[in-house]
Amino acid sequence: PVGVTIMWEADTYSPPFYKGKALLSYEAGVRIIALPDTGASSNPLGSGDLVYLWKKDSNPIPSASGFNKNTFSFTSPKPLTQTKIGLEVSSLDDSSNSEMQIYLPQVKPFILFYKNDPLLGIQYNRPFFDEATLANGSLSLVAEPYFFSNENLGGTAPTLRYSWLVNGKEVKSYGRSITLQNVAGTKGSSLVSLAMRGVSKTFQTARRDLVVSFTEGKSSASPIF
């Protein structure tokens, strides 16, 4: 048999210093790599002449299959479906072969808010989950869209729609950041909401609500991540 390790990587966004794997969301691109090890070489990437037959949901993919074609890229399906990837690996003389399959998990994108400090920058280690406190002055929030497609975040054409709401009323904002002010030092609270949606990838959506409490004292620290 041919020993093969299958790895996959999603073309989705995660913020700087994020230690986890970028997960696969609906309609996002994904690349699968097969690393063979026939035992004939210490280097698994150069271990023999192999032929790869890729299958998606039990259907062969001729365009992605063939000699030395150990990678397969495609777009993840829409919600309520599950993708099964099959792979057959064989030598040119068919003296050794293997067959395996994997299921690709899908997740829904989500949003986390972070404080953008004028001196320290974005505090990625201290996200806001449900509430934040603001004393006299201002609070700048940055929204990070976990596991949205990278193509939604790059380029000049807008591919993500941002809808900011404060107490249910839409406010003008320039992208992923908003600044709140409490100049008078009044007490109270406001509900800040952000909804994101892909322009072309309409199944990539997320929403985050944050209760901001206005106080007269010093601002409290956000929860430790």
Image (cartoon, rainbow, N blue to C red):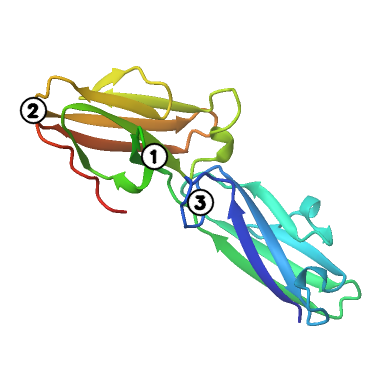
Whole-number angstrom distance, CA of label 1 to CA of label 3: 36 Å
* Res 5 quadrant in image: bottom right
Q: Residue 25 or 84: which is nearer the viewer?
A: 25
The disc placed on residue 122 is 1
- Residue sitting at x 46%, y 52%: 18
Q: Is residue 195 above or below residue 52?
A: above
Residue pushed farthest right?
Answer: 93
Crowdedness of circle 3 by 10 Å Cα count: few (<14), some, many (20+)?
Answer: few
The quadrant of the image that shows the C terminus is bottom left
Q: Is residue 199 left or right of residue 102?
A: left
Q: Is residue 108 left or right of residue 75?
A: left
| Type of the residue with mark 2 | Lys
- Residue sitting at x 42%, y 21%: 174
**Residue identifier under label 3:** 81
Whole-number angstrom distance, CA of label 2 to CA of label 3: 48 Å
Crowdedness of circle 1 by 10 Å Cα count: few (<14), some, many (20+)?
Answer: some
| Type of the residue with mark 1 | Ile
**Residue identifier under label 2:** 187
